[in-house]
């Protein structure tokens, strides 16, 4: 049985302020910590043993997931004293693996929502005889990613970080953040110092003649690293566009968790999630958004593609579009926040104090 490592120790800086008190994999998506979806998908693909490589806010994972038995998994936790980067984190948990030297070990970034066929990636790895196999996906604008061109047989030819000029964009295939390593290859990563698997391990393996195999799987794929992407991913889980066995409820336009209170004439659409104990007032309209537990949205507010943190308060008639409101923040009535604006945890905005729009 294939075992897996999940990389969940990053600081999640792009997702601030949601990651100030909560590590990115524990931020709720479709009503449960995002990591739950990844664990459930790995379990559904036959994985039973998963080692979580933790660092930032490491202490919150084990109290929530315990030994993993509720998910049918055996979970272990390894915390880095200092962050070791993606490659260093993989090396740091090697002693917990049960696999023999030739066995495949799955590795997942902890912030990717995807419909990847995990069994197919392992099968590709075994039939190609590769040292490392990578899930690749195709994107329209590859400039923000690491490009991974392959030959006709899928063998990786290069790793090109964040290309800028048209000549550098030689492919639309990018590293999608899921790998299969031959166990013995993990043991060759340097121990006890930070290592980036993307910038150091993969290019060095390639230079030394190792066989790296790419598998393009173009099903649903989203990097939930930014607030906009996180909200989109959560909504897609609720709508059923992104697959997960862990969504607590039926797929549809909205997911309202038990103990949330939603006024009869409030309108929730586009995969909106309302967390436990949250309250949505009369006539509020919320589309494609996530309202975390205990948050309050007052009557007449209009919220689109936004994320409202736990216990935050949105005043009457306030408009949020593409905004993030941190945990416990208070946005007064009659404000207008748009286009990527972030309200810090616990901040207070008075009534009618902000009218922001990028086209003003
Ligand atoms: P940003 O700060 O917003 O870039 O997010 P991040 O810290 O999560 O970094 P990135 O998205 O590049 O990380 C990819 C994956 O590796 C995520 O699942 C991270 O949790 C994980 N990761 C990154 N650095 C470390 C590390 O030093 N240790 C461990 N254990 N995991 C890491």
Image (cartoon, grey):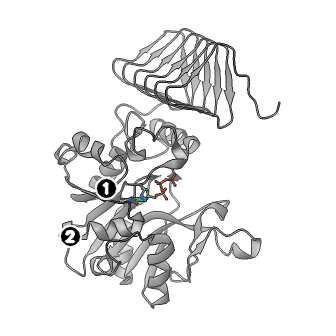
The C terminus lies in quadrant: top right
Q: Which residue occupies 64% across, 63% down?
A: 142
Say whether residue 286 is left or right of residue 273.
right
Q: What element carries label 1?
A: helix
In front: 220, or 184?
A: 184
Say whether residue 99 is left or right of residue 338.
left
Residue 143, by quadrant, is: bottom right
- Pick whichever of labels 1 and 2 is earlier in the sequence: 1
Look at the image and tell me whether residue 225 can be seen.
no
How far across and down, in percent of the image, does residue 53 sit? 31, 58
- Give me the disc on residue 310: none
CA neighbours of label 2 inside 10 A, class few (<14), some (14 to 19), many (20+): few
User: Which residue does the numbered mark 1 point to in the structure image?
Assistant: 42
User: Which residue does the numbered mark 2 point to in the structure image?
Assistant: 95
Mark 1 C-beta to ligand 1 under 8 Å: no
How far across and down, in percent of the image, does residue 32 sit? 36, 36
Q: Which residue occupies 43% across, 85% down?
A: 211
Q: Do the residues labelled 1 and 2 touch (CB within 8 Å)?
A: no
Mark 2 C-beta to ligand 1 under 8 Å: no
Q: Is mark 2 on a helix, strand or loop?
A: helix
Say whether residue 34 is left or right of residue 14.
left
Say whether residue 244 is left or right of residue 268.
left
How far across and down, in percent of the image, does residue 266 sit? 54, 14
Q: Nearer the viewer, mark 1 or mark 2?
A: 2
Q: From this view, report whether residue 300 is shown above or below residue 115.
A: above
In front: 328, or 149?
A: 328
Q: How far apart in space, not on screen, are marks 1 and 2 (Cα)?
A: 21 Å
Look at the image and tell me whether residue 41 can be seen.
yes
Q: From this view, report whether residue 351 is shown above or below residue 216.
A: above
How far across and down, in percent of the image, does residue 326 sit? 51, 31
The N terminus lies in quadrant: bottom left
């Amino acid at each position: 049985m294939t075992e897996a490592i999940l990389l969940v120790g990053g600081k999640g800086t792009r997702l601030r302020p949601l990651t100030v008190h909560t590590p990115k994999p524990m931020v709720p998506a479709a009503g449960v910590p995002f990591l739950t979806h990844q664990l459930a998908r790995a379990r559904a693909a036959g994985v039973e043993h998963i080692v979580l490589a933790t660092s930032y806010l490491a202490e919150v994972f084990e109290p929530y997931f315990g030994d993993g038995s509720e998910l049918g998994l055996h979970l272990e936790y390894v915390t880095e004293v200092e962050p070791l980067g993606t490659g260093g984190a993989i090396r740091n948990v090697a002693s917990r693996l049960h696999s023999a030297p030739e066995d495949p070990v799955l590795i997942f970034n902890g912030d990717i929502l995807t419909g990847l066929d995990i069994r197919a990636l392992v099968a590709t790895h075994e039939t190609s005889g590769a040292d490392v196999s990578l899930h690749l996906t195709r994107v329209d604008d590859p400039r923000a990613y690491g490009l991974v061109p392959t030959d006709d047989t899928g063998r990786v030819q290069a790793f090109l970080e964040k290309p800028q000029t048209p000549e550098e964009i030689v492919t639309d295939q990018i590293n999608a953040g899921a790998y299969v390593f031959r166990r013995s290859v993990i043991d060759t990563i340097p121990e006890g110092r930070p290592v980036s698997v993307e910038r150091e391990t993969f290019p060095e393996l390639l230079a030394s003649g190792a066989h790296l195999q790419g598998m393009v799987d173009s099903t649903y794929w989203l990097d939930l690293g930014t607030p906009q992407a996180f909200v989109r991913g959560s909504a897609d889980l609720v709508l059923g566009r992104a697959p997960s066995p862990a969504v607590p409820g039926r797929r549809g336009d909205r997911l309202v968790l038990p103990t949330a209170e939603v006024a009869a004439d409030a309108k929730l659409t586009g995969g909106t999630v309302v967390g436990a104990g949250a309250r949505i007032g009369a006539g509020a309209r919320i589309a494609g958004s996530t309202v975390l537990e205990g948050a309050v949205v007052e009557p007449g507010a209009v919220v689109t593609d936004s994320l409202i943190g736990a216990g935050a308060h949105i005043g009457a008639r306030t408009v949020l579009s593409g905004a993030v409101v941190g945990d416990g923040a208070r946005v007064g009535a009659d404000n207008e926040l748009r286009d990527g604006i972030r309200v810090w945890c616990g901040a207070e905005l008075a009534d009618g104090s902000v009218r922001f729009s990028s086209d003003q």
